[in-house]
Amino acid sequence: MLGPNGAGKTTLINVIAGLARADAGHAAVMGADVVKDYRRARSMLGVVPQELVFDPFFTVRETLRIQSGYFGIRNNKAWIDEVMHHLDLTGKADANMRALSGGMKRRVLVAQALVHKPPVIVLDEPTAGVDVELRQGLWQFVRRLNRDGHTIVLTTHYLEEAEAYCGRIAMLKAGRIAALDSTANLLKSFSGSQMKLRLDREELPLDFPGELSSRDGNAFVLKLKNFQEVESALAKLREARVEILEMELEPPDLEDVFLRITK
Amino acid sequence: MTGFQTLLYKEMLRFWKVSVQTIAAPVLTAILYLVIFGHALEGRAGAFAGVTYSSFLVPGLVMMSVLQNAFANSSSSLIQSKMTGNIVFVLLPPISYLEFFGAYVLAATARGLAVGSGVMLATVWFVDLHLVAPLWTLGFGLASAALAAALGLLAGIVSEKVDQLAAFQNFVILPLTMLAGVFYSVHSLPAPWGQVSHFNPFFYMVDGFRYGFFGTADLSPWTSLAVVASSFFFVSLGCVLILRSGYKLRW
């Protein structure tokens, strides 16, 4: 889920998780209504909250054991050890939550959401304020969970993360879903390639394809709908005997889509 | 059931881990009350016939400690979780509102009884005290701790900030305990204060609890039990209805 601050991403997650009540409509997790069938819905859902919350009374291992118990699971040691291993928490297993750095606390939050192996995992800005190393490790682990059959729902402000990891993207604007489609379709329908040209003169030939988005002397930036337009642009230049000093083609960009939709 | 058991265990572990503050400190406070008031008021304050003031005071102090600590446990646990945000750890799992209610109230009752037993153990050596009707003592200890625990849960749910909870504690709980006849027999109060005390549910707890020690009290223990039990029932009903609606905790 993408959207500017205040678009309603966290509110939507709270409705799904039973932490907020929807004014209208209903939500279900794997078919289980989050209000009427809340026990089944919640047992199939793992939520990593955005805020760095923790219980200062307990150690990492205690936190995870207690969380397992809340979901009705006893003797969860093997899975807890595995989750801690993948999140690089094993060394801190017996450290008090208070003593952990922000990044470590974030990892524990992820581990807490996974104790009951939920089929649906919701990550609310999992990489906000997280260093590069943890971000890499986290994505690796999340991708593994996804490969193992878990559905991952995430919100992020980093568009490149959404583009790289998400199969489907929902864009929210003022509490409404403004676009919902596969990442590839969104890119195709809302944005074209960008062509940057530097020529040996300060004007383009007549009837030049594409849409000129900016010009600085002999440097031009054009938006193209598809690759045929690249072809015809080059043909036009050849016809007019214009020399290309520099040329750059940029693929469709999610940032562009995002700005168009949320504007 | 595992969810309930785990929540109960977590709530118990929470106060047990800081037992110096949650159990030892209130026991010390009660001993100070006994030493100071016992010394200052021995022979002056009215008690029951044939009962010294200190002996009269001890059951009152025990009950006061039970009430204050049971209330403090559920209310402060909830308000802390709300303030720090870690309440979501309890709200996200499939724990029902009845399990939630049961775990918080039971753990707070346990803390109240632990402190009460501590006060009892620490003071009983200094006074002449016999358990005439131990079942009444036990019954009132349990019922009163549970009522205070449920009140604490209610206050913890409704309060949005620590100062609102503190106001509830200072302007409702503390006066009710102090005016419940902990330090005196309400019979010794001038009219109309003796009558006014009868509107205070905490008075019935202290009176019934004392009956277990002396076999005599201001009221029949059955009357007191009926008041305490019905108070517990209504406060619990309020808690359960609020928890079921999700008011303040979920929306």
Image (tube, coloured by chain):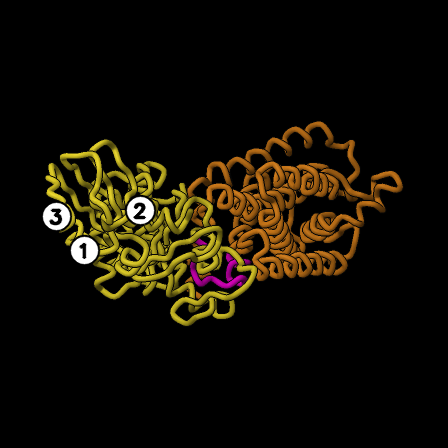
Chain colours: A yellow, B orange
* Residue lying at 70% horizontally and 57% vertically, measured from the top left: B231
Q: Is residue A228 above or below residue B130?
A: below
Label 1 marks a residue whose chain is: A
Q: Between residues B142 and A4, which one lies in front from this camera angle?
A: A4
Name which residue type carries label 3: Glu
Q: Between residues A237 and B192, which one lies in front from this camera angle?
A: A237
SS at mark 3 in the image: helix
* Residue lying at 28% horizontally and 44% vertically, measured from the top left: A212
Is residue B151 covered in magenta? no
Total numbered labels placed on residues in the image: 3
Residue B75 is left or right of residue A126, and the answer is: right
Task: For marks 3 and 1, give the CA distance.
Answer: 19 Å
SS at mark 2 in the image: helix
Task: For marks 3 and 2, give the CA distance.
Answer: 35 Å
Classify mark 3: residues with Cα within 10 Å, few (<14), some (14-19) or many (20+): few
Residue wearing tag 3: A239
**Figure quadrant of the N terminus of chain A:** bottom left
